[in-house]
Image (cartoon, rainbow, N blue to C red):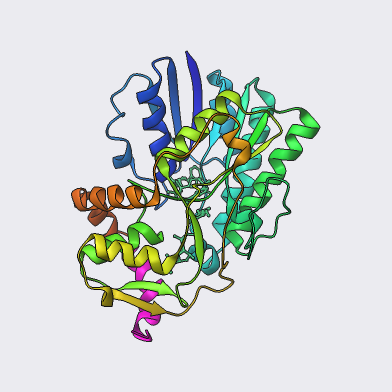
Amino acid sequence: MQRILVTGGAGFIGSNFIQYMINTYKEVEIVNLDKLTYAGNLNNLRSVERDDRYSFFQGDIADRQLVNEILCCKKFDTIVNFAAETHVDRSINRPDDFLKTDIFGTFALLEAARQSDIKRYLQISTDEVYGSISEGSFSEDSSLTPSSPYSASKGGGDLLCLAYYKTYGLPTIITRAANNYGPFQYPEKIVPLFITNALEDQPLPLYGDGSQVREWLHVEDHCRALDAVLQNGRPGEIYNIGGYCEEKNRVIAETIVDLLKKPRELITYVDDRPGHDVRYSIDSGKVKSLGWQPQISLEEGLSKTVAWYKKNRKWWQEIKNTEYKNYYKTQYGRRLAHAKA
Ligand code: NAD
Ligand code: DAU
């Protein structure tokens, strides 16, 4: 039996990963440590919550005593750290928790891991640490030029992981994934925000001129890549995970309204994000050499995702009735009032 500590497993990617691992492997036991911030949602894990191989523990990765106790009491083979503050706009409004969780929380986990004899520590990071690139793609050796407090704090966590490998020999591996989309994504990120707003005939607030480009990766392809890295990745290494499909935000917005047969007039151009990165693009050749490749095209993935949000209204409507309301008003109220149609 392989025992894995997953942190941040009640969020979007973490919950998809737990479901993937439990459904793919019989001999796996997962403990999910999650603080349940606004983004953590136990409804994401209903399909596995009764499985004997899964258990949940509410707590903060930055709580050193707690993390030490968890790692002392149970012997884990692997730690997969998804826990983070993850939304760029929130990091621009209030960076504090980003530094606490993404840097200090990573430090607390690494320190506890150093006292245990884990075989793998996998840090789930992001292509945003490289910043924007106008042409070509970033490789794992590219320098870090983060633009937002979010990407800077994720870069800080990555550097700590590299240092713990070099100095203490802790078997850390870093993955840097592109923009994920799919089921259970909190509707603050562009894909679920635009789908759910369109379903409610609300405006789709597109920043700037909508020409920014992101590389899109379906969350199931991301989970398969993480599995490949856990099995065949080498400690001390970094692996980019991209979806091999770059697209402009404007096209993403148009595709969503078209799939839902809603009028394109819902797309509303609003004030840009400060420090907005123009284009993300990564070279994922290294993770491909581990035998992985994406299986879901952007066209298929968006269509499946739209269908999921149509079918799971209750899931996202519950979220939209919580703190989300205030967040939405702060983030978009003034922007939408001044919007250029
Ligand atoms: P998310 O915001 O949906 O979920 C984050 C989870 O972490 C939540 O369940 C939250 O409760 C938990 N959490 C936050 N602070 C915590 C703390 N101090 N202690 C314990 N738990 C805490 O995030 P996501 O989109 O699933 O992203 C997961 C990871 O993947 C993050 O590290 C993120 O940087 C990285 N990533 C995300 C994307 C993407 O497109 N979403 C792309 C590349 C990398
Ligand atoms: O690249 C990986 C990263 O992708 C992850 O590390 C982050 O956790 C994740 O949030 C995501 O960051 P982005 O900033 O790229 O994602 P977001 O969905 O916030 O925005 C995607 C693009 O859409 C970006 O160019 C900004 C634009 N956008 C976003 C929102 C929320 C809009 O035009 N309007 C919006 O309302």
**Residue 99 drawn at (x, y percent):** 61, 54
Q: Does residue 334 show up magenta in the picture?
A: yes
Q: Is residue 81 above or below residue 5?
A: below
Q: Quadrant of the C terminus?
A: bottom left
Q: How many marks?
A: 0
Q: Residue at x 56, y 70 (%)?
A: 276
Name the one closer to the observer, 41 or 130. Answer: 130
Mark yes or no: residue 162 visible. yes
Q: Does residue 325 show up magenta in the picture?
A: yes
Tell me the quarter of the picture where residue 162 sits: top right
Q: Residue at x 42, y 43 (%)?
A: 219
Secondary structure mostly taken by the magenta-highlighted segment of the chain: helix
Per the rendered image, the range of residues in magenta is: 324-341
| Position of residue 107 in the picture relative to residue 22 (left or right) | right
Name the one closer to the observer, 156 or 302. Answer: 302
Q: Residue at x 21, y 70 (%)?
A: 201
Tell me the quarter of the picture where residue 160 sits: top right
Mark yes or no: residue 330 visible. no
| Position of residue 317 in the picture relative to residue 290 (left or right) | left
Q: Residue at x 69, y 39 (%)?
A: 161
**Residue 294 drawn at (x, y percent):** 46, 40
Q: Is residue 45 above or below residue 139?
A: above
Name the one closer to the observer, 273 or 61. Answer: 273
